Amino acid sequence: MRGKFITFEGGEGAGKSTQIERIAKNLTRAGHKVLVTREPGGSPGAEAVRHVVLSGAAQKFGSEMEAVLFAAARGDNVQQIILPALESGTHVLCDRFMDSSRVYQGVSSGVDMEFILGMEQAVTEGARPDLTLIFDIPPELGLQRASKVWAEDGPDRFESDTLELHEKRRQGFLDIAEAEPDRCVVIDASQSLPQVRKATDAAIAKLFPKPKKATGKPSARKKAKVTAK
Ligand code: T5A
């Protein structure tokens, strides 16, 4: 059976990586095959692109160029890592995916949405998420959390954007969730870790219904037959 594809989206420092790591462990413990990947990155080719976009080296070429680079990296990750895993029955958990391009490059950087969606269609062929968890957090709180894990070189190309842009992104993710309620679940990521854990687990559980436990009792029909003897 094909694996499930679950993507994790939201603003900076929303707690996606923390939950992905935990969910991967839980699913593995429950006997599932799980692969964790991230964007930009995942495959060797896409990891090379990650450095170019997050260092800010591509910024001077404009937002369209950045959008193309994110799409190219996504295409490589889909072909090399995501699709082979899904087809072999492995569940894939991906830290950011196509919604990040819609929001960061489309909504906040003003790249034409038709252009973004066209590239999305081309590179995600056969790999559309079954479930997308959107971690919603006020940008000030997210950035405060993220700053605790920044490397010595400080915030990256996107983390260092203005608060106004981070607010636009937050709304962009919420708009996607509203437009695609069958795919997206919004998690209030400003809550405490145990609360976020609970909300995340509830959303994931819907994709992995537990098999019904056998009661050991004969069914009503069988029972009737036995009584008739
Ligand atoms: N990008 C990406 C685009 O512009 N276009 C695209 O198409 C794509 C794919 C990627 C950047 O690239 C941009 C978006 C991003 O700016 P990244 O380095 O991969 O950047 O970083 P992020 O995905 O933004 O990940 P972060 O590390 O910033 O955030 P996470 O993963 O959401 O947060 P996490 O789990 O690392 O948690 C941060 C801190 O908060 C704590 C954790 O312990 C950790 O210290 N924490 C909590 N504290 C209190 N309460 C809770 N509930 C907590 N949950 C976590």
Image: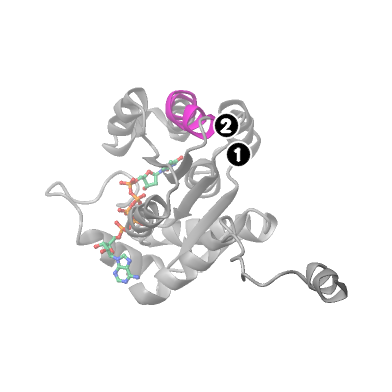
Mark 2, secondary structure of its residue: loop
Quarter of image, res 225:
bottom right
Is the Cβ of the residue at disc 2 closer than 8 Å to that at disc 1?
yes
Q: Which residue is mark 2?
A: 124
Q: Which residue is mark 1?
A: 128
Where ligand 1 lies, by image quadrant? bottom left
Q: Residue at x 32, y 24 (%)?
A: 44
In the picture, which quadrant includes the N terminus? top right
Q: Residue at x 36, y 75 (%)?
A: 194
Mark 1, secondary structure of its residue: loop
Seen from the viewer's position, the closer of residues 3 and 171 is 3
Image mark count: 2
Residue 90 sits inside the magenta stretch: no
Kindly give the residue lying farthest to the right in the view shown: 228
Q: Amino acid at mark 1?
A: Arg
Looking at the image, what colour scheme do you see?
one colour
Quarter of image, res 205:
bottom right
- The magenta region covers 73-87
